[in-house]
Amino acid sequence: MTNPQDLTFERVFASPSLNGPAPREAKFSPDGRYLTVLRNREDDRERYDLWGFDIAAGEWRMLVDSEALGTGRELSEDEKMQRERARVGNLSGIISYQWAKDGSGVLVPLDGDLYFARLDGDVTRLTDTEESELNPALSSTAQYVSFVRDRQLWVAPVGEEATPITPKEGETIRWGEAEFVAQEEMGRLTGYWWSPNDSRLVVQRTDESPVGIVTRAAIGATGTQVFDQRYPVAGSDNAIVELYVTDPDGGNRVKVDLGEETDIYIARVDWAPDGSAIYVQRQNREQTVLDMLRVDPATGASEVWFTENAAREDYWINLSDNYRFLDDGTLLWWSERDGYGHLYRFDGDEWTQLTEGEWIVTKLLGVNQNEGTAYFSGTFDDVLAHQIYRIELDRPGESMVRVTDGGWQTGGVMDKQGRSLLVTRSKPDQPPQTYLADLEGGAIQTWVEENALDADHPYAPYLASHVMPEYGMIEAEDGTPLNWMMLKPQMEPGKRYPVFYYHYSGPGPQIVDRGWGGALAQAIVDRGYIYFALDNRGTANRGVDFEQPLYRAMGGVEVRDQKAGAEYLQSLDFVDPDKIALYGWSYGGYMTLKQLQADPGIYAAGIAGAPVTRWELYDTHYTERFMGDPNVVPEAYEAASAIPDAANITDPLLLIHGMADDNVVFENSSELISALQENNVPFEMMLYPGYTHRVSGEQISPHLWNTIFRFLDSHGVTPPE
């Protein structure tokens, strides 16, 4: 039985959000007078409208009402897939926007069409078509609007009819779009770039014909759609990417010289601030070398400006957006060359290291070139509580100061001139707050979203049972310290409690921090479970040597580190050693399988959501970065696979997958299902017709979580009486 103040999964995923207001996409107007954000509605937590904050007056105003303006038109399949790539497939209303450089208004995509919203409330519709306008953008001076439609790039002077400026070349040629792996794995969502004065633009041409076709069945509730999807699985051919420089009308097109090798990745493209050059980051297929090309916009001729190499032979290059071309021709650049992610300055000949030490610069926020200062977030004080720092570019080592309060998990956004700083911070007992900060001392100048946990806050009814996490460290087999986090239910002396062991375990996300954890973990604790998470070797923000053990060995060191976490739990007198349940999604789902296979009997049960089961089924850029080419190192892929040892699973298993998943395709689970059945291994399964890699929604999410806990109940992984 739960008391009235205990959280249910139904309430966790209902509106309004228990996190309070959650503004997204915060941006400053070019003159710094306005701050704009996307705000979710109280009655629909996943629908966003555009709001503007007059900083001087301290007043909010809705600029675009997504419900009043929207048509509800069905999005194209391409736009749906792009939203999945951008991790916003569950959101509705306005999900992105762009300020005009002159500050006159913002470009707003909505329901596949484009609008221009002025600050006086006037909204002009720019397109009205059945097709979606993908990757819309205002040109640098806001003279033109551009977008991708039907595999071509279209351009028009604002307010006029758009025309395609690239040719129509068939089903396998796309202009102006980032290829699949750039969107999914490289953090590059666009395929064209305007020059600073609008006189030229760089356009990507993608030839998908070499890419193998994966026949993906999107199984829905009332029917099945079959998609022949160009999906470059590990070890197979990638799309061929070319770059062209053209006038806004499509004339005077020249090809960029990207070198003789075509089996490359185009990681980033940028114009020099004065438009004199184009800078292209070219990565080799192995992702161990990154060349910064300097391109002549008039001829397309290129030269290597500098080369970045992986920090060690058995490592890779982590791509980053933490760089900035400065007006004086120098470059601020993020690199892991000394073993930790730090900032450097390059003048064309020499490098100057700006930050150093056994800590990480996590994000370059902004540069004030007039004052010669740069702002960034990092882990200097505490890897579990990232802070914002300022340095003076001419004397970086002695000038670094922290401009935010310690103890909070903190992030920020700055305007392009580095004059305004928007800080978002949270703690385990305070959901995210947002404020404009004083640049010198970091003090709160103006609350943008105080989100106070007062009596009117959606989370207020549940504060009485809110649990603060405990933090600690255990040692990996080589002595490396591993951070963990634990939330305990209300416990009675002498009784032992089950553990809900959450993990992701793969490269990238840091799970354990001192930020707001959300209501889901609290709901699990309210049910009488200990909630536990641990960051194993391979996860982010601890340096090269901490991440490196994944190299050509996924499903190895992570399993052993998480086992160390389980053994630590079993040593605690308040933990029931026979009731430790694993849960993970995506890489975490894969890890659940590998842990159950490696250590039968340690875990009471495992829940594997949308797991990768065989890395040859996953894409090139992600998989080969860590695992190499399966044609060269097949033994590494065999060892990492969750298929060969499927019969070793003896503990209860619940397998969950969306049946229209285009990221970790359903074949990953169907192959596992077959292997388990052919070996007479019992397991349970919950499939979600029509859902992609993201199985979520106001009704579906509680269904999923109730399913998980019914599964645990049925196998006796329950709190003590």
Image: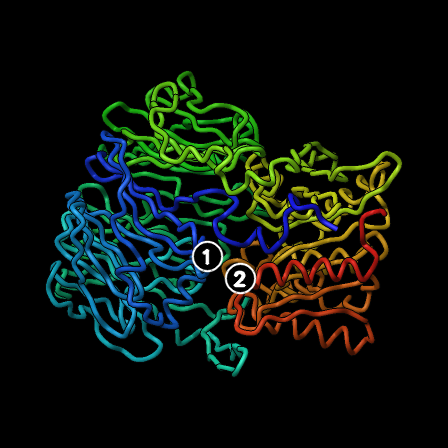
Using the image as rendered, state which of residue 616 and residue 131 is in the foreground: 131
Q: Amino acid at mark 1?
A: Arg
Where is 355 relative to 277, above or below?
Answer: above
* Residue 168 position within the rendered picture, expressed as x and y whole percent measured from the top left: 24, 77
Q: Amino acid at mark 2?
A: Arg
What's the residue at 43%, 54% (across, down)? 43
Could you classify mark 1 by the number of other residues whose Cα lies within 10 Å: few (under 14), some (14-19), or many (20 or more)?
A: few
Classify residue 532 as left or right of residue 300: right
For residue 718, side relative to residue 449 (left or right): right
Asked if disc 2 and disc 1 are in contact, CB closer than 8 Å, the reply is: yes
Image location (x, y in percent) of residue 559: 73, 51
Tag shown at residue 87 = 1
Q: Secondary structure at mark 1?
A: loop
The secondary element bearing badge 2 is classed as loop
Q: Return the mark for residue 78.
A: none
Q: Residue furthest top?
A: 398
Q: Quadrant of residue 354?
A: top left
Q: Which residue is mark 2?
A: 694
User: 262 or 712, which lies in front?
Assistant: 712
Q: Between residues 591 and 526, which one lies in front from this camera angle?
A: 526
Q: How far apart are labels 2 and 1 at the CA level?
A: 9 Å
